[in-house]
Amino acid sequence: MNHLIELHPDVKKALESNKPVIALESTIISHGMPYPQNVEMAKKVEDIVREGGAVPATIAIMDGKIKVGLDEASLEKLGNSEGVAKVSRRDLAEIIATKRIGATTVASTMICAEMAGIKFFVTGGIGGVHRGVEETMDISADLDELGKTDVAVICAGAKSILDLDKTMEYLETKGVPVIGYQTEVLPAFFTRTSDIKLNTVSETTEDIAAIIKAKHDLKLEGGTVIANPILESDELPKEYIDGIVMEAVKEAEENGIGGKDSTPFLLGKIVEKTEGKSLEANIKLVYNNAKVGTQIAVDYFNMQ
């Protein structure tokens, strides 16, 4: 194990015993939600993972180390500190070397999970190709990471602030399987549906686990996206949220906001414009992903 990686004792024990571990990102805590809701959400997600029979491993950069699994004090510090760095692949070495507090994105969580030997990762939604990419070339590092890092990512699709068609085209080019869990179309984060038909659909978590196992047995590089729609009772009306997303995108353009600042800006604007409804939906879809993702991981390890 790399000397820059620090495993929580529970995570270390589970990995040594070949038990399922679920990686969890930390950008959703530091940049995705206000305090104290962010910490409450993080604790609840960890509880759901434990109840499902796996060990949670929230990942963050602290004290010059990649911490895989956080204690309660570290979670509080991450959720309530100013100036937490948003860490993707390009930032990992810098934030570790300067001993700053860093929250991991989808891309860097995948990297750290693979380094630690963790095969499954639950998040809200992946990044992707931003709207107006023809002008900005703004494409999330998450997509490249999915093309080369072997971690299965359970999410509610790509964030609805993105160009979903181009995001799917990019993933296809990278050879990344996108498996719809009980859905034939790509979920669009706050809503269950989109106009994008998926190539692979699985009705059970066992079927998804079997696909991932076959992929590992074949030693195929790259990750897998499991697209798990937000529950029908929790989704926002499609026309309503699409209109708000377009308003937020326009404001970002007018303010010259792009790159890694665009996602937190857009999600913050959407929370404001929906009067908190989008935040509630975001939290609930993460809980649902944690439940489904844990079951997939447990099924996978039962096949060993």
Image (cartoon, grey):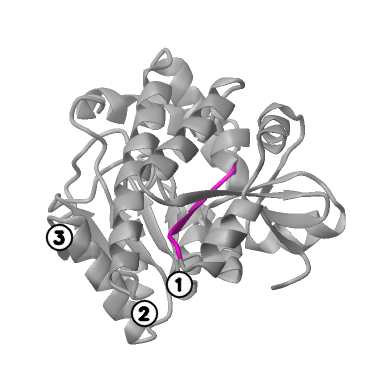
Quadrant for the N terminus in the image: bottom right
Measured as percent of width and height from the top left, residue 86 is found at 66, 46
* Mark 2–mark 3 distance (CA, rounded to whole Å): 19 Å
Query: Mark 1: few, some, or many residues within 10 Å (few <14, many ≥20)?
Result: many
- Magenta segment: 19-26
Q: Residue at x 63, y 56 (%)?
A: 88
Q: Is residue 23 magenta?
A: yes
Do the CB atoms of the residues marked 2 and 3 lie less than 8 Å apart? no
Q: Residue at x 58, y 56 (%)?
A: 11
Query: Mark 2: few, some, or many residues within 10 Å (few <14, many ≥20)?
Result: some
Measured as percent of width and height from the top left, residue 53 is found at 38, 49
Q: Is residue 271 visible?
A: yes
Q: Which residue is mark 3?
A: 201
Q: Which residue is mark 1?
A: 150
Do the CB atoms of the residues marked 1 and 2 lie less than 8 Å apart? yes
Task: Pick the residue in front: 13 or 160.
Answer: 13
Task: Pick the residue in front: 247 or 271.
Answer: 271
Q: Is residue 150 magenta?
A: no
**229 relative to 110, above or below:** above
Q: Which residue is mark 2?
A: 216
* Mark 1–mark 2 distance (CA, rounded to whole Å): 8 Å
The amino acid marked with disc number 3 is Val
Name the quadrant containing residue 9. Answer: bottom right
